[in-house]
Amino acid sequence: MGVQALYALQNGFLGAPRSLLFYGDFSAERAQIPVACYLVRATDGTILFDTGLSPRAVPGLLRNDPMACFTNEDLLVHRLDVLGLEADDIDVVVLSHLHYDHAGGAELFARSELVVQKDEYAYALYPAPFFASFYYRKNFDLPDRRWRLLDGDVELAPGVTVLRTEGHTPGHQSLMVELPETGPVILTGDACYWQEHLDAERVPGVVWNPTLALHAIKRLKTLARLTGARVFPGHDPEFWRTVKQSPDAYR
Ligand SMILES: [Zn+2]
């Protein structure tokens, strides 16, 4: 019983100015950041954490963002195909939040349970004007799907636990995955963009509530210290160069 493997799936790259990466940094200097999804194989089923960019959105991003980079292999369906999986094989899709680079592929999973915090779903449908450009309604306005709206932490399956980490957005959530050999891993999503956000307690530049975002970072740091978990930040180019990428897996 429990988790068998964790796969890191690359879903292309975006360009982002430091002002969007680090709260209070006004530099326009840009960095190329990875877009990541993760697949968890467990005895009870197959769980996907985040769905990356919508293929529909990619042409526009490639046109408007000189650092955007997206190959055919980066398509989520192709990443799953390499693992012998189709969208219908995914039992549960956990969405850290509903920003366009995390919820873009949600519509692919017609058979899956879609897990998101209730507050995130409500806010994404009616975001504040300053945040509206990060939410593409087409990505998540899917009323015929099986949405499971959470209100806080929950253990989804043995060794797979949702951790509420709001702040970046009103209902952001991270995922702790307890692996038999590697030990616990925390997939932060956008609660921590880079390792630097964790180490220096830097809040993401794109943020709904910076105080809560800082609490989320401290919460994940504390949990990591108490459990010995490794922390996988959401958009860290340095980390991404060292991560074991699919089809290799953390066991
Ligand atoms: Zn985000």
Image: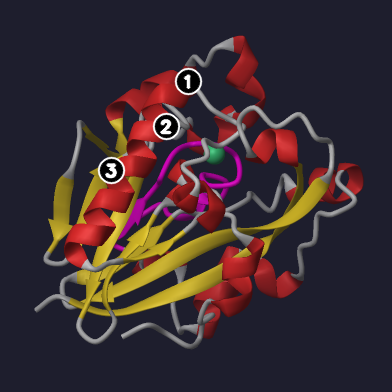
User: Which residue lies under the disc numbered 3?
Assistant: 219
Disc 1 is placed on an element classified as helix
Q: Nearer the viewer, residue 216 or 127?
A: 216
Residue extending farthest front: 200
Q: Position of residue 163 (x, y in %)?
A: 25, 46
- Structural crowding at the residue carrying mark 3, measured as other residues with C-alpha within 10 Å and reported as few (<14), some (14–19) or many (≥20): some
Q: Is residue 65 left or right of residue 32?
A: right
Question: 160 above or below 140?
Answer: below
* Residue type highlighted by circle 1: Leu
Q: Nearer the viewer, residue 222 or 126?
A: 222
Q: Earlier in the sequence, mark 3 or mark 1?
A: 1
Disc 3 is placed on an element classified as helix
User: Which residue lies under the disc numbered 2?
Assistant: 213
Q: Earlier in the sequence, mark 2 or mark 3?
A: 2
For the residues labelled 1 and 2, say whether their Cβ atoms are less than 8 Å apart: no
Q: Nearer the viewer, mark 3 or mark 1?
A: 3
Q: Nearer the viewer, mark 1 or mark 2?
A: 2
* Residue type highlighted by circle 3: Arg
Does the image show residue 143?
no
Disc 2 is placed on an element classified as helix
Give the residue drawn at x 18%, y 59%.
226
Quote the CA–CA distance across marks 1 and 2.
Answer: 21 Å
Ligand 1 location (quadrant):
top right
The magenta segment is 91-111
User: Which residue lies under the disc numbered 1?
Assistant: 125
- Structural crowding at the residue carrying mark 2, measured as other residues with C-alpha within 10 Å and reported as few (<14), some (14–19) or many (≥20): many
